[in-house]
C-alpha cells in the first residue's frame, strides 16, 4: 500500500469516526478510536511516536530523548 493510499484511508476513517461520534470528545478518545479502526483494517499503528521536525527556522525535538 502506498503512502498516498494510507493517507487517504486515515483521512476517510477519521471523517467517518467524527461523523459517527460527533464533536466534543477528548483528542485522546479520537486517537484511540482511530487506532482501533486502523488496526481492524490490518494496518500497523504506533501512537505518539517521538520525532524531530524542522519548520522554517524552528526545530522541534518533541519527545526525542537526548
Image (cartoon, grey):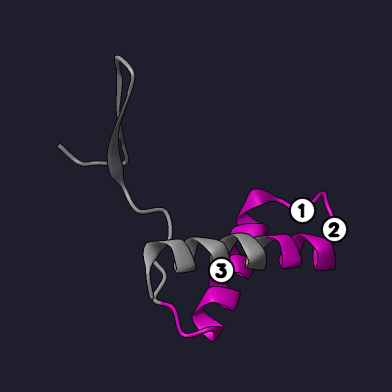
Picture residue at 35% right of the left edge, 53% below the top: 49
Picture residue at 39% right of the left edge, 63% below the top: 3
Task: Determine the image quadrant of residue 4.
Answer: bottom left
Give me the disc on residue 22.
Answer: 2
Magenta span contains residue 6: no
- Does 49 appear above or below 16? above
Magenta span contains residue 27: yes
Asked whether the beta carbons under mark 2 and mark 1 sit within 8 Å of each other, the answer is yes
Asked whether the beta carbons under mark 1 and mark 3 sit within 8 Å of each other, the answer is no
Residue identified by numbered label 1: 25
Picture residue at 83% right of the left edge, 51% below the top: 23
Helix, strand or loop for disc 2:
loop
**Quarter of the image with the N terminus in it:** bottom left
Of the residues under marks 3 and 2, which one precedes in the sequence?
3
Pick the front one: 3 or 38:
3
Helix, strand or loop for disc 3:
helix
Task: Give the magenta range.
Answer: 15-43
Name the spot of residue 56 as percent of width and height, x first. 33, 18
Residue identified by numbered label 3: 9
Give the spatial CA distance, label 2 vs label 1.
8 Å
Give me the disc on residue 37.
Answer: none
Front position among marks 2 and 1: 2
Amino acid at each position: 500500500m502506498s503512502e498516498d493510499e494510507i493517507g487517504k484511508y486515515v483521512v476517510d476513517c477519521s471523517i467517518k469516526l467524527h461523523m459517527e461520534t460527533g464533536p466534543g470528545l477528548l483528542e485522546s478518545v479520537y486517537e484511540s478510536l482511530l487506532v482501533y479502526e486502523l488496526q481492524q483494517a490490518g494496518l500497523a499503528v504506533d501512537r505518539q511516536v517521538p520525532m524531530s521536525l524542522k519548520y522554517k527556522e524552528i526545530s522541534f525535538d518533541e519527545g526525542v530523548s537526548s
